Image (cartoon, coloured by chain):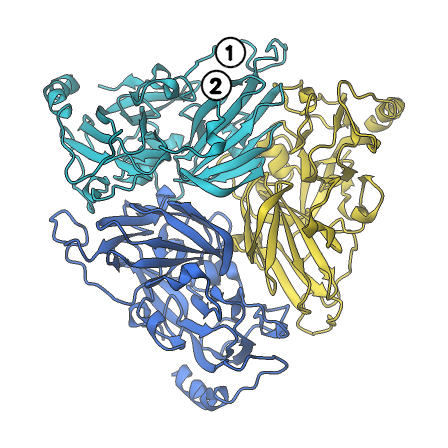
Chain colours: A blue, B cyan, C yellow
Amino acid sequence: MRKSACSRSLGLLAGTFMLAGVASAAWAEKHAFEMTIEDTRMTLVDKQTFHTFAFNGQVPAPLIHVKEGDEISVHVMNLTSLPHSIHWHGLLQRGTWRQDGVPGVTQEAIKPGEDFTYTFVAEPSGTLWYHCHVNVNEHVAMRGMWGPFIVDPVKPVALERKVTKDYILMLSDWSSEWAEKPGYGGVPGDVFDYFTINGKAFPDSQPIRVSKGDVVRMRLIGAGELTHSIHIHGHIFKVAFKDGRPLPQPFEADTIMVGPGERYDLIFEADNPGRWMIHDHVDSHTMNGEKPMGGLMAVIEYSEIANDDAFYDWKDKQFEPDFYYEESLKKAHGMHEAKVFKGQAIQ
Amino acid sequence: MRKSACSRSLGLLAGTFMLAGVASAAWAEKHAFEMTIEDTRMTLVDKQTFHTFAFNGQVPAPLIHVKEGDEISVHVMNLTSLPHSIHWHGLLQRGTWRQDGVPGVTQEAIKPGEDFTYTFVAEPSGTLWYHCHVNVNEHVAMRGMWGPFIVDPVKPVALERKVTKDYILMLSDWSSEWAEKPGYGGVPGDVFDYFTINGKAFPDSQPIRVSKGDVVRMRLIGAGELTHSIHIHGHIFKVAFKDGRPLPQPFEADTIMVGPGERYDLIFEADNPGRWMIHDHVDSHTMNGEKPMGGLMAVIEYSEIANDDAFYDWKDKQFEPDFYYEESLKKAHGMHEAKVFKGQAIQ
Amino acid sequence: MRKSACSRSLGLLAGTFMLAGVASAAWAEKHAFEMTIEDTRMTLVDKQTFHTFAFNGQVPAPLIHVKEGDEISVHVMNLTSLPHSIHWHGLLQRGTWRQDGVPGVTQEAIKPGEDFTYTFVAEPSGTLWYHCHVNVNEHVAMRGMWGPFIVDPVKPVALERKVTKDYILMLSDWSSEWAEKPGYGGVPGDVFDYFTINGKAFPDSQPIRVSKGDVVRMRLIGAGELTHSIHIHGHIFKVAFKDGRPLPQPFEADTIMVGPGERYDLIFEADNPGRWMIHDHVDSHTMNGEKPMGGLMAVIEYSEIANDDAFYDWKDKQFEPDFYYEESLKKAHGMHEAKVFKGQAIQ
């Protein structure tokens, strides 16, 4: 109700923004996105719900996928009862520091019912992300205010040109004590007891489906409070990018620590048909509350292998094809919402 | 009692396994290992005991030390009253994904009183390890279900060919609240209050003895729940391997963070006779419960320096020569148990 | 009172030390420093005070800034009622292992009222530090017993020769429960609720002032119990040094994890005038107790940008020019105290 009037009246404005003082290349596209922040109830796993402040009603927030040098404007409408902002983590904001989204430093926070338009150039390329910068201990740590921002490079490096399957995995942590107490929580001493990939905990997470011969890119984004130690079974990956930047010398590993705010892009060839775990090796991060073998886990499934073993946890799994943004990443540049991440509006 | 009958009757079988569908090189050896999982009481330090589910009654589990390409079979007998499995962390299981040891994904968990034979090729080379994959929050984090798996490379890199002293250090964490409550524990909010190298806390850990001119390799394995920041005094080491893989460009450091599941091989020349601490720089990890200066600490002792200072904590230390697997690593390839890691059987 | 008699009588001695068995180069300077350890009350932020054992009454401890190969002697007088020592973290102590400062291993702890003189050569070069090695869980984690030790290299690498602004940031964590209970605290289960850069939490930390064209070096030192994930807005930095050692191949990032004991030197060009956050991305580390948006945060201010926005938190900030040691680092080699770090003596 609150939403409709405001976003309708501001919709026109957003299409006609101007970039002030920012040079852009000939190939640059212009993108104008509309975003709301809405009280939204998400389900992490089973019956564990969480009151979030969701961008466009989804957690993770919509994928922004553009090309290096593109001109971006995002019109944000705050439909919650608390102040917010958006920081574009990793974007340089060259010449546009007032678009950086830090309340008390680059702008005033966006008050309830108010709006703000961010205007900037997509630079540099790589795996970036965005999140609220108000009371990050609560809003980022456990109100789901984060989404992926992927900038395709003008000149991709050799390693990434071979990629056939592109996945995004946002890692986060939740303290169920604060699930239904918006405006509170995220304080020293909190016990984190739910752990998610793209907002879902095992077994409500999704398989990552590949075929032999695929070259897989996994974009890991540390979106929460804790550090995760991500292990992939059956493969050695190359750590190819750190924070969106290509490493001068990629190195091999089977486990990678991802700290808050960090991004690692892993690249490996799918050359070993089977069913392979990918999970956090921090042992307690594979819990759902006090129930073992949940949390930050998923399975890489090869199309060559049938999933009909009676013992297989995901034997009858209903597959959601865009859970790792794999479908959205194939679409034209722009902002892409996904049904799988939508929650329930809280009036 | 439970043990004898089963392992005797299965002993013959284990020697006659066959590898299905796995190619192996001409030089490959075949190894057939027998392993039990047993309720075992370990002493971490002083009077702090812990109920573990120990492989062959020891924590860490027996060293498996083979050559790249060797054909391995491990016959496991579960003598505890809870289900288990073994995941071979870092082993590729190329063509043998059903040997990967993940219950609900690659196999059914091994029930109490039942057995399972894992059959696979030792690939890739490097510092690998193995651990249970059932309820990892409890079984890995605090029931001692982990051991080292070292695969010698067919073609060692230059740096490792110089090594004269080879040590394994498995790092782990324990929450004494659950010490005598097997089947429980490892839940969000747990307070970890004991911290060990190869299952022992200072001062019950052991010195690392070197001589001037030695080239030392330390294989650090993050086997527990927490991240450790390992600092070595008096030396700059090269970080030479990550997860068993040689780094394309080793780098120098005096402190290295080791996360859960990660392995780092450090190599340095012992060129500075003295008595040097090696310890976790996470300050509280040098506690035994609430007693300071314990936990994850040891001393590198040079043979050139006498240990007779009156103030030296380890002046009268009884030396256990295989505590860092240094003796076992010199033996012929195979599986090696060590008396120093044996606990007390729980009937 | 306790202090004056002892330090006066020992002052002469300290100027005439001799280095035993240590070769030094022709250009080496000799430095003799006087240091006390004193019960000192520091203010972290607002009204949150902490009882520390401060070197020369300041937290962080005085900057020691010398050249590679210099001969150092530090005469330490313990004026507190608890035992202490000084470990020179990262210094090789080649041939001088008894100067390494580890009680029970290289020396007896320095008892209350007693003194000790450390004598060694400044080697290797880089960002090093020093700290007490007695009951580190309390003395290092939350009694402020740490300071920076910068050794200029004889042959600087190309990247560091371009630096125009040199800053030191020591990161630490505090558990307010133990603020006024010296001799206690730093135990498993502690809740850390204050987080500081150079001993101060936002908004009582200080801006980092640069001008367009500056080449900035930030020397991050993990001096506390926890791991910090430091993010700089608006810039991509090169991770140039790890633990004082130049990386063979610096890599780019916008976020860097700094564990306990680790040091990372970041180098970047100040090419993007604006107001940019630098902060810990561990969300709860931006708290002061239960108050959001404090802790481990600061702002990089460009001289090209006015600070007069009404919304700016630091609009009327009183600037302390040596807060990141930037002035002290320009002085002649030696030991440099700074008024901004001095606390209040506790009698």
Quadrant that contains the N terminus of chain A: bottom left
Tell me where residue B139 appears, x and y as whole percent.
Answer: 30, 35
Query: Residue B186's quadrant in the figure?
Result: top left
Residue furthest to the front in view is B26
Please tell me which residue lies in front, B97 or A175. Answer: B97
> Percent x, y for residue B248?
48, 44
- Residue bearing the label numbered 1: B317
Answer left or right for C285 relative to A230.
right
Near mark 1 (Cα within 10 A), the count class, few <14, some 14-19 or many ≥20, is few
Which residue has dot 2 on it? B206
Residue A39, compared with residue C49, is above or below; it is below
Q: Earlier in the sequence, mark 1 or mark 2?
A: 2
Placement of A133 over or under B11, stated as above or below? below
Q: Is residue C341 left or right of residue A112?
A: right
The foreground one among B114 and A2 is B114
Callout 2 amino acid:
Gln
Neighbour class for label 2 at 10 Å: few (<14), some, many (≥20)? Answer: many
Tell me if residue C205 can be seen: no
Task: Name the residue located 59 percent from the left edge and 45 percent from the top edge.
Answer: C247
Secondary element at image label 2: loop
Query: Of the residues shown, which amino acid type is indicated by label 1?
Result: Lys
Q: Nearer the viewer, residue B300 or B94?
A: B94
Q: Secondary structure at mark 1?
A: loop
Verify CB contact (< 8 Å) between mark 1 and mark 2. Answer: yes
Q: Residue A154 location in percent, x, y?
A: 49, 71
- Residue plotted at (78% across, 38% down): C66
Asked if residue C44 can be seen in this view, the reply is yes
